[in-house]
Image: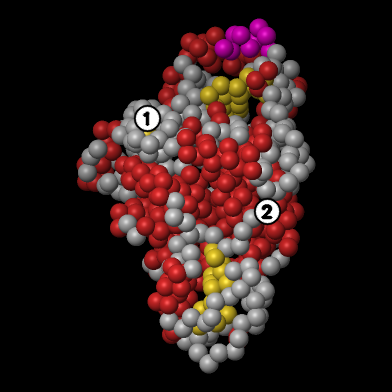
Amino acid sequence: MKWLLFLSLSFCLAAAHPGDEPSLVPWLDSEVEAFQRARAENKPVLLYLEAVWCHWCHVIDRETYGNAEVAELINGHFIPVRIDQDARPDLANRYRDYGWPATIWFTPDGRDMVKRQGYIGPEPMARLLRAIIADPTPEASAQLEQPVIAATSSLDEALRSELLRRHVTTHDAETGGLAINQKFLDRDSVELDLVLCGEGGAAACVRARRTLDAALALIDPVWGGVYQYSTFADWEHPHFEKLATIQGEYLRIYVLAAARTGEAQYSRAARLIQDYLRNFLTDRDGAFYASQDADLVPGEKAAGYFSLPDAERRALGIPRIDRNRYARENGVIAEALATRYEFTRDETALDAALRAVAWIEANRATADGGFRHGANDPAGPYLADTLAMGRAYLALYKATAERNFLAKAGRAADFIDARFRDEHGGFSTAQSADAVIKPVPQIDENIALARFANLLFQITGESRYREIAAEAMRYLTTPDVATRRITEAGILLADREFNRDPLHLTVVGGKDEPIAQQLFLAALDQPGWYKRPEWWDRSEGPLPNPDVTYPELKRPAVFVCTDNRCSLPIFEPAGLSAFLAANQ
């Protein structure tokens, strides 16, 4: 979701969804049917990718597609198809750089012809339509080039240095965030700085805190939850939509930041996000809805509304909630909630994560370890859904040491490996061999997959998961991929983790022994995502990755291991932090 922001990008409902209103354009909702008709009638396809929460989508619905001249041109010369990008990760990932609304024209055989981003007014749209009718030749910029994938799974020194340079220089040293017009918390940039901060990087600490502090302005002070981003190069002009994935991403980052810094305001931010999720985006069965609209009345900006207190807002109504329950969104939020439990032991967070996971398992799981996006996936399955659920399982395993979660994470990784390898390298966003609009690899998904699969390898010792991480890294370390966007902190994070062992903490002792329980909690308290906490209760059999031989002891202990040695047994929880502080 985050790169969309680089563009000049049970409640009563305030109004019906604009797509439910009568339309002058007879939109299809399937690109398969659209291309069948396009070939039969020899007409280009016009694809309108909307977001149901998007203010400018509401405006283009009313002003542009509600214009008689525009509708007449579309109806006479094009096959129009309209698709909710949240429901179609394959299309959303392919055209994410065009923002929402995105408008793409295709030749009848499915080649990209013309692509435009954002709102287009009725007069410019009419001119553009007439130009395409007069000359339906694909624009050179519309063609999607596949990069030649790297032969290595690690960044070379020159590329690593360039990405580090970009990471530093794209930070806004005055207001925080990236030095661009849209202000939001770029999760990978902040997480990388938190890691560097933990290693003694003073400048990284400053960067992380500056952005974390500034991004607090995007949290709704009344209902909690995070607005998507702010415009005008400051944090004071938010766009008010609240997307489930963004709630999960911010929740996870503020939890990690609180663990690293001890700052109470970051803990409070995480709690406000969790409160919003519980009060607005959770259904009665525990699953999470997809989003809440930016507008109270579609197409009318809602800054005045969101400046009101709770009672006055509710008296006017509540912006529309998209009640779709997608595996991707639920997995992202469940991972964040499990991470919050890991560092705070907030049982409500763990319970919410478990309820969401249980609903997705009951309603979105496939027989072979993967997950559907929604009830019906027209071009699925999609990588994002199984990946998000796999990461949620891994987070639950780390937080609870319950091995069933680790087994499910492994099944998710195996499903991904079997379904989503791209013929050009890396992992594609969807499995759809017959798709006219071909799915492609997406950078953020390959970053998340590389990190997930590599840590899964470290915890299980199963080499096939290392191979999944290596394949994703081959895509990410390709120069044309790594330098495509203005900064790639996530690739730096994935590269660091791929080339070093995680913090390895093993508690040896029965799970019913109070001191072993305290030692495990002390292990969980250690900051950072890239760690391998284990709890060896001998009654459960060998550890998942028995790469260390631990001694028989008369009482529980925790060990800190590196690639070449382990600590002496540590018998008291306070001794673990003291040991780690002395051996940084």
Q: Is residue 134 magenta?
A: yes
Image location (x, y in percent) of residue 488? 55, 40
- In the displayed structure, would residue 538 be above or below residue 259? below
Q: Residue at x 40, y 55 (%)?
A: 257
Query: Closest to the observer: 13 or 330?
Result: 330
- In the displayed structure, would residue 203 be above or below residue 180? below
Image location (x, y in percent) of residue 47? 60, 26
Q: Which residues are magenta?
A: 128-136
**Residue 275 occupies which quadrant of the picture?**
bottom left
Name the amino acid, label 2: Ala
Image location (x, y in percent) of residue 29? 60, 33
**Which residue is label 1 attached to?**
233
Q: Residue at x 67, y 58 (%)?
A: 413
Distance in Å between CA atoms under marks 1 and 2 = 36 Å
Crowd band around label 2 with a 10 angstrom C-alpha radius: few (<14), some (14–19), many (20+):
many
Q: Residue at x 53, y 85 (%)?
A: 509
Image location (x, y in percent) of residue 429? 65, 43
**Which residue is label 2 attached to?**
469
Asked whether the viewer can see residue 110, the reply is: yes
- Residue 208: give its label: none
- In the displayed structure, would residue 361 be above or below residue 127? below
| Callout 1: SS | loop
Name the amino acid, label 1: Ala
Crowd band around label 1 with a 10 angstrom C-alpha radius: few (<14), some (14–19), many (20+):
some
Q: How many marks?
A: 2
